[in-house]
Image: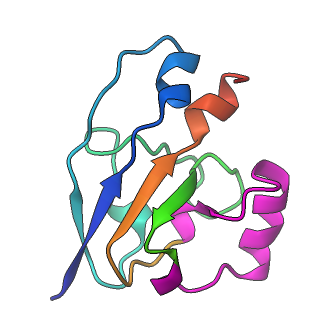
Amino acid sequence: MKRFSVSFAESASMDTAAGETEQNFADVQVPAGKNLSEDLTVKNSPVLFGCRTGICGTCVVEVIAGAEALPAPDEDELEILDLYADGQPAARLACQIDLQADITIRAQCKARWSGA
């Protein structure tokens, strides 16, 4: 089965907002067509997940590279992104991404929930 790489971009605002030390995460290999929320965990990813159904907004990420190969967000995802990532065109809900190519993402949730 074909696998794609998920890389994590560093986010200084995410790390410093909560007073945390910087942690680097290695690339994660995810099977093609598999949902990111099924393979990304607290141990291997800075992305947090709440409901895993696309309604809580906890897993908002910025897609830094590879967005052109992803399916477009559906109406439900766009509605949640309007609430939690308004004005951020590269934002996606990680729990709604079915991987079709290598991507690089930056977690947005810690900074948002800490008020940064």
Comparing 70 with 68, the one in front is: 68
- Residue 99 lies, with reference to residue 24, above or below; the image says below
Q: Position of residue 51 (x, y in %)?
A: 60, 53
- Residue 89 lies, with reference to residue 40, above or below; the image says below
**Residue drawn at x 49%, y 11% as measured from the top left:** 19
**Residue drawn at x 56%, y 70% as measured from the top left:** 96
Q: Is residue 91 magenta?
A: yes
**Residue drawn at x 31%, y 57% as measured from the top left:** 7
**Residue drawn at x 34%, y 39% as measured from the top left:** 42
- Residue 47 lies, with reference to residue 55, above or below; the image says above
- Quadrant placement of the N terminus: bottom left
8 left or right of 25 in image: right
Q: Position of residue 79 (x, y in %)?
A: 83, 67
32 left or right of 62 in image: left
Comparing 10 with 43, the one in front is: 10
Find residue 58 and report its image quarter. Answer: top right
- Quadrant placement of the C terminus: top right
Residue range highlighted in magenta = 68-96
Render colour scheme: rainbow
Q: Which residue, as the protein is rendered here, is positioned at the far top?
A: 19
